[in-house]
């Protein structure tokens, strides 16, 4: 079933309910939301030749128009390709071309950066909020969503590994159905009086979480800034009331700090679902102390979106159970629609308490990687998704993550892949070798650190490397610190010992 059917049903039953809000100002009710999406779907078909199964990319910051574009594309039968708006234009264009997207929606800020690199196979971009977009969404059209099955592609999300280019994760309509239903069972309820607040990027989990709120005809509010600002979130939540939001752990820390400074307890916020990176125990303890039992945790990944384990608000707020600290340091128990295991390198289940790779299978697991059968076969084996994360299960089914077998850095809730940064730095003529690691950072969760071996006789400065990176990769991916070393520590096989690099960094930081 096409996910856009949920919008049609809510618009039929609750036509006058407020749907889209900019700040606390109502932009559209559910009748208007559905009509704009239907008009857009008609324009996509008639003016742009979008057919069921085509891909439509969105490279834009958060806005109410983002949701209209999403549902318009789904109504037309297309799949969404949400692209991180922080990416360099060259990086975004690669994703758009690899997805073979027929059209891309952009924002005013992203349009110029993309223009020099836009692939010729993609039509002229349409700017969200522009006169052209307004014309495409105008009218009173009531178009039925194109028929889609549970196995049809709905969301093509690009993620990266440590092996190079991003991979397109194929998320189907059925995968997202399962995610939404599991949310109701394992994470939180949704009522029509609720407001989903989009402060985290809509190109990621925050945007995907819109569907359960559409199904329940709840409100969808985008801060006027279009981004996360702790003070704005606290103020807006009081005016909206019954707010739900998804937040990375770094956002939670900033929100709690702002609330504590202002003597605020988060009034108006009903639920903050956190995930997307490591949440330190002391931080979540402090969050509950300052803001009360408003927090739930989820653990998922692009390949099984938002739907591997969950730790509900009662468990997050529990301070009575004799092992409450251990449970709070975990990522919870398996969500209802999946099986979760911990296995050794040969796929054999490991005993309780023993660390190994986390595997998962069930209805939300991706259909595979876009046009990449080899990567799919490596990641999904005998029906199990191998997550690349290392963890251990306790006797009650709580999963605690130990480390990541892939060296992904999560900074501010966003994945940064060391190889991308290393490859960019290695194109500098003064760089002979480089290794990039993540180290704990109180503000961002992790910070990107580059250890650089310069070419003989080369005079390389951090400022020069910064400029070099900014010409090739997104600003948020560039290293926060450059350490120049005579050589990189390696094992007998020539592999760089990143654990040793992290130890070296911590030692020098403590001595400074």
Image (spheres, grey):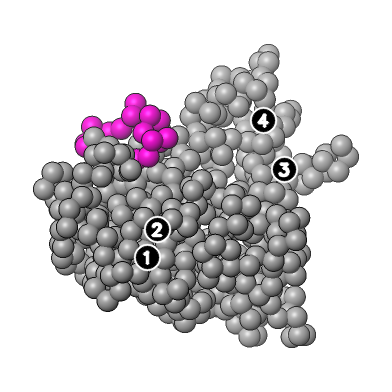
Q: Quadrant of residue 121?
A: top left
Of the pair 511 and 245, the residue shown nearer to us: 245
- Circle 1/circle 3 CB separation < 8 Å: no
Q: CA distance from mark 2 to mark 4?
A: 52 Å
Label 2 vs 3, first from the N-terminus: 2
Q: Residue at 61% across / 77% down in the picture?
A: 313
Residue 31 image position (x, y, % from top left): 26, 65
Label 2 vs 4, first from the N-terminus: 2
Q: Closer to the camera: disc 1 or disc 4?
A: 1
Q: What residue did someone put label 3 on?
A: 501
- Circle 2/circle 1 CB separation < 8 Å: yes
Q: Secondary structure at mark 2?
A: strand
Q: Is residue 274 magenta?
A: no
Q: Which mark is residue 26?
A: 2
Of the pair 229 and 318, the residue shown nearer to us: 229
Q: What residue did someone put label 4 on?
A: 452
Label 1 vs 3, first from the N-terminus: 1
Of the pair 37 and 330, the residue shown nearer to us: 37
Side of 145 where 367 appears, left or right? right
Q: Residue at 75% across / 70% down in the picture?
A: 289
Q: Closer to the camera: disc 2 or disc 4?
A: 2
Q: Secondary structure at mark 4?
A: strand
Q: CA distance from mark 4 to mark 3?
A: 11 Å
Q: What residue did someone put label 1 on?
A: 18
Q: What residue range appears in magenta?
A: 106-123
């Amino acid at each position: 079933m096409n996910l856009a059917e949920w919008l049609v049903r809510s618009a039929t039953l609750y036509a006058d309910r407020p749907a889209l809000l900019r700040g606390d100002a109502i932009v559209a009710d559910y009748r208007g939301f559905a009509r704009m999406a239907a008009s857009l779907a008609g324009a996509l078909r008639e003016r742009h030749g979008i057919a069921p199964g085509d891909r439509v990319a969105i490279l834009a910051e958060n806005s109410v128009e983002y949701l209209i574009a999403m549902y318009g594309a789904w109504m037309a039968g297309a799949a969404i390709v949400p692209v991180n708006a922080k990416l360099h234009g060259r990086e975004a264009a690669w994703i758009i071309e690899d997805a073979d997207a027929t059209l891309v929606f952009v924002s005013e800020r992203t349009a110029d950066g993309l223009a020099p690199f836009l692939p010729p196979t993609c039509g002229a971009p349409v700017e969200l909020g522009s006169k052209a977009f307004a014309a495409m969404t105008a009218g009173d059209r009531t178009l039925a969503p194109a028929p889609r099955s549970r196995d049809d592609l709905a969301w093509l999300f690009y993620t990266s590994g440590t092996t190079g280019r991003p991979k397109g994760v194929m998320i189907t309509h059925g995968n997202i159905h399962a995610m939404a239903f599991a949310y109701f069972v394992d994470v939180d309820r949704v009522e029509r009086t609720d407001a989903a607040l989009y402060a985290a990027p809509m190109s990621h989990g925050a945007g995907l979480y819109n569907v359960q709120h559409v199904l329940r005809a709840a409100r969808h509010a985008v801060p006027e800034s279009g981004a996360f600002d702790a003070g704005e979130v606290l103020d807006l939540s009081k005016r909206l009331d019954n707010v739900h939001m998804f937040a990375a752990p770094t956002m939670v820390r900033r929100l709690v700090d702002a609330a504590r400074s202002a003597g605020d307890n988060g009034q108006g916020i009903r639920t903050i679902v956190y995930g997307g990176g490591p949440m330190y125990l002391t931080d979540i303890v402090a969050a509950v102390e300052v803001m009360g039992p408003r927090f739930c945790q989820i653990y998922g990944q692009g390949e099984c979106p938002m739907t591997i384990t969950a730790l509900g608000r009662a468990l997050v707020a529990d301070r009575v159970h004799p092992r409450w600290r251990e449970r709070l340091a975990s990522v919870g128990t398996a969500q209802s629609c999946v099986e979760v295991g911990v296995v050794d390198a040969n796929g054999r289940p490991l005993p309780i308490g023993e660390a190994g790779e986390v595997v998962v299978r069930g209805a939300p697991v991706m259909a595979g990687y876009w046009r990449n059968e080899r990567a799919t076969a490596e990641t999904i084996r005998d029906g199990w998704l191998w997550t690349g994360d290392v963890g251990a299960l306790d006797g009650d089914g709580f999963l605690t993550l130990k480390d990541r077998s892939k060296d992904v850095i999560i900074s501010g809730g966003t994945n940064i892949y060391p190889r991308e940064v290393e490859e960019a730095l290695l194109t500098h003529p003064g760089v002979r070798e480089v290794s990039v690691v993540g180290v704990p950072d109180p503000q961002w969760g992790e910070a990107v650190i580059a250890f650089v071996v310069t070419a003989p006789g080369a005079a390389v400065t951090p400022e020069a490397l910064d400029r070099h990176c900014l010409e090739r990769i997104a600003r948020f991916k560039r290293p926060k610190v450059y350490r120049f070393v005579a050589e990189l520590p390696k094992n007998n096989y020539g592999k760089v010992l990143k654990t040793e690099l992290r130890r070296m960094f911590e030692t020098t930081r403590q001595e400074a």
